[in-house]
Amino acid sequence: MTPIINRKFFIANEEDILQGRTTDIYFKRTLEVLKAKGLMDVQIAAELTVSGLPRDWTWGVYCGLEEVLRLFEGKDIDIWGLPEGTIFPSRTQSGIRLPLMVIEGAYSHFCLLESPMLGMLSHSSGVATMASRCRKAAGDLPMIAFGVRRAHPAIAPMLDRSSYIGGCDGVSSILGSELLGREADGTMPHALILIIGQSVDAFRAFDEVMGPEVPRIVLADTYSDEKVEALAAAETIDLYGVRLDTPSSRRGSFPDIVREVRWELDLHGHKDVNIILSGGLDETTIPPLVQAGASGFGIGSSISSAPSIDFALDIVEKEGVPIAKKGKYGGRKYLYRCPNCLDFEVSLTKQIPICRNCNIEMINAEVKLMERGKRIVRAETPDAIRDRVLTQLSKMVVE
């Protein structure tokens, strides 16, 4: 086969994805066999589950559903599932793998799209989950997604959307912010200071050129001690905040640096100047910085390079008869959730389960999302999905 040479960048376009060209080859071969053997119309039910979550995670944030629904539009299938932004464990109270989505119809109608569907959900959910873990660690402090420079630019909008849904307050990329209908957030790079030559001159130039809508947040760690540059910035322009991005080789105790900067600013009458931190932050490094006096965070690699959540799609019913491969649970299941503790349980008969923790009836957790290839629920805004995530986070006791 001759390599493709007529593309400038090594990316798939929308048509490649919709046509199944990004799928694993065995799905294409499966479709050929089904067609040859007259099995194109065999009706199945398939469920989306995860056997376990990455690292020490006990919960994940379900993200990427909107793309999946757009992927499946026009296919003669029905889809039930959890709303995007649902926080979920890998198992129900009884230890059964939790079915986040159920697809019913002829397997041939979506066979070629199984790989891109799983990829959309796995990557987006991993990013959203890490953003939520950082959100929990940061409390109510502002948190901006800075991670697009650590990933391929083709997926920058997905990364920013997933980061925002997971709990970030803003995103840094231009295209990602446009997708969200927000203004992009950011400060200034070290490059600006290095080109101008002196930190104070760069602070002044930034203040002179930027419009009033741009917050005056400047880097205070390019040449001198952080507290020296922070104080110089505060005494040069009407400053909103300083950003500290101290490299690890010079960092020592980052919380102590934050305390020093806060002390120096307060000592000289600049208690209203915020301290924004970036560089190597995650859910474990954020809490000590909150205690030290941080005002907000710019979080990059830990979110954009978050581990994917390994979703799998498995057939659990064929022509109305339960069926499953080894290690999976056959039969169409109906999903319920406790409105109090937010735990899940499944039922094979639609009998409403009782929560083992709260001793109350659970409520139906599934929503019918698509009927014969037509969406029957409107697309939700990223803000509405993010609100769902934050509401659940506020109710959950999470590690």
Image (cartoon, helix red, strand yellow):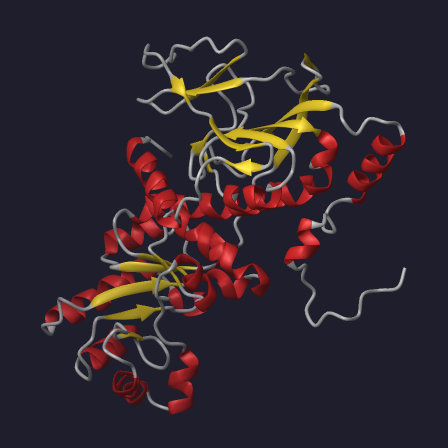
What residue sits 84% from the left and 39% below the top? 29
What residue sits 81% from the left and 39% below the top? 26
Residue 198 % position (x, y): 33, 89
- Decide if residue 130 is on the left or right side of residue 101: left
What residue sits 27% from the left and 63% below the top? 258
Front in this rendered view, residue 179 or 95: 179
Q: Determine if residue 228 is in view.
A: yes
Front in this rendered view, residue 147 or 273: 147
- Decide if residue 125 is on the left or right side of residue 332: left
- Compared with 22, 246 (above or below) is below
Residue 159 % position (x, y): 50, 55
Residue 57 % position (x, y): 48, 36
Front in this rendered view, residue 227 or 367: 367
- Decide if residue 388 is on the left or right side of residue 308: left
Q: The C terminus appears in which quarter of the rendering? A: top left
What residue sits 37% from the left and 79% below the top? 222
Q: Determine if residue 284 is in view.
A: no
Q: The N terminus appears in which quarter of the rendering? A: bottom right
Image-quadrant location for residue 392: top left
- Compared with 266, 126 (above or below) is above
Residue at the limit of the structure toward the left, as seen here = 269
Image-quadrant location for residue 185: bottom left
Q: How many marks?
A: 0
Residue 146 % position (x, y): 43, 62
Front in this rendered view, residue 275 or 170: 170
